[in-house]
Amino acid sequence: MRLGGSVLSASAPSSKPSSAASTLWRLALASSDNWETVAATCAAGEEDDGRVSPLAGAAGCRSGPRPAAPAGLQAGAQARSLVQHRGTGFNSINLTATQWAATTSIDFSLAQLVQVIVLLGTGGLNGGGYMASKYVVLAMYGAILVIHGLINSLPIQYMAWVGQLGAFWDVAGMFVLVIVIPAVAKERASAGFIFTHFNVDDGTGIKDKAYILALGLLMSQYSIVGYDASAHMTEETKNADWSGPMGIITSVALSSVFGWVYLVALTSLVTDDIPYLLDPGNDAGGYAVAQALYDAFHGRFGTGVGGLVCLGLVAGATFLCGCACITSNSRMGYAFSRDRAMPFSHFWYRINKQEVPFNVVWLSVAVAFVMALTVAFQAMLSIATVGQYIAYALPIFFRVTTARRSFVPGTFHLGNYGVVVGWVAVAWVALVTVLFSLPVAYPVAADNFNYTPVLVGGVVVLSVGAWVLHARFWFRGPITNVEL
């Protein structure tokens, strides 16, 4: 998903990040991958096994850079990639819709995390603490979206400051938690427990360990979406044809180390009393990560305030992350409306005097709020993950099929390995798409039904239908702003 406050490039259309800024930025990107997973896990109560699966994903497939979209509104890089690889315009609808789902999942996770912090801060569920109703949580979610909309309506020079704050918060916060969590906890899970234990008593009715591992991969896959934002930023960096890909590789390498260490530190708090952490009757209301952090500090100091501070760090990073999501959504929406690939493009393709796509910013806020009214939380995570991975895989698929002979490599390329790596990527996306469409609980009922295949399938059907019946007759790809 996109990192907290990732709008460093949004200072001016002509600005280029320095090498020092780029180094800090890549480190921030590396540390940011995990914040969303923690917030979402707090919101989901760690129902899918919260140790082995995220760690497996973190070790092998951390994400590339995911800054928000560039200041100059040059966010059509992914659409351009589709056209160059013989792609089709229907991917614009799929990508935009799933990015809205990602925003929904992040900000709704934040609203639920705030509710947990308030609950623990006022005494906990068993101590008379305030448990917000679902309507209050929805109101908090709406307020968060409005605040993000207001921030994204500011001139881009202010957004640059938000981006710098986000970079600092991500790096500093991760290092603080990696050091503090193991130091505070009196009891820590053994390495064998962390890496080999599967929780089969979570009330979902799933006992097969392989199935649990597969479903748990959603958290790690969810935390690494956002590759399209890398394409946004490369248009505003020096030597973009080389520095863009190297930024992705650097972030992957850093994330593989720092992200994995961070997740190991966090999951070390999860000891053998997992049913207690998942129990809706505990002080955190069944939110396992929050309860584990609270108990660790309470056991050491007799008070859980330190745990609330740690949760506050996560909440702050998630807030900045959601803000960056609105930025990315609006730039992507602007780019597609500029290319007349969205309904009512003439209305969305407008910027104000501060060069902000004001209309699309508030469209993103409105759609994200409506999605929370209609989609279950688990489905939001799945849709945000599956939909974006499908959008990412399409250019790769066209690259290794229809454009295999006509594709012209850039400065940075994989040579003869490119096709092999491309097919591996397509196969992996096909696999996770199937996995995340499977039932998440047994027996399957209306209250635990996985709506991911229905909703993602609906978006695909509408997108393909719009392309076949209408868009293919006139859509010719991104409109060129500058001729070199």
Image: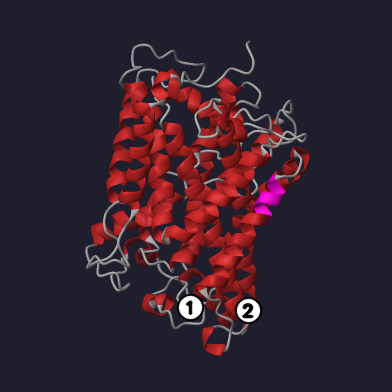
- Asked whether residue 68 is in view, the answer is no
Left/right placement of residue 126 relative to residue 453 reads: right
Circle 2: element type:
helix
- Residue 454 horizontal/vertical position (percent): 31, 50
For residue 218, the mark is none
Question: Separation of disc 2 and disc 1 at Cα?
Answer: 13 Å
Q: What residue type is labelled 1?
A: Gly
What x and y, as percent, mark residue 161? 75, 45
State whether residue 174 is above or below residue 181: above
Tag 1 residue: 285
Q: Residue at x 57, y 62 (%)?
A: 110
Residue drawn at point x = 73 percent, y = 41 percent: 160
Indicate the quadrant where residue 122 lies. Answer: bottom right
Residue 450: give x, y in percent of width and height: 31, 58
Q: Mark 2 points at which residue?
A: 121
Q: Give the range drawn in magenta.
A: 147-152
Is the residue 51 above or below the residue 401 in the image? below
Task: Report the front residue among 448 and 247.
Answer: 448
Specify the farthest residue to the bottom.
127
N-terminal of the pair, mark 2 or mark 1, is 2
The residue nearer to you, when weighing 191 against 384, is: 384
Q: Is residue 144 above or below residue 459?
A: below
In terms of secondary structure, what is the magenta stretch mainly? Answer: helix
Q: In which quarter of the image is the C terminus?
A: top right
The amino acid beneath tag 2 is Gly
Picture coordinates of residue 234, whole percent (x, y): 59, 28
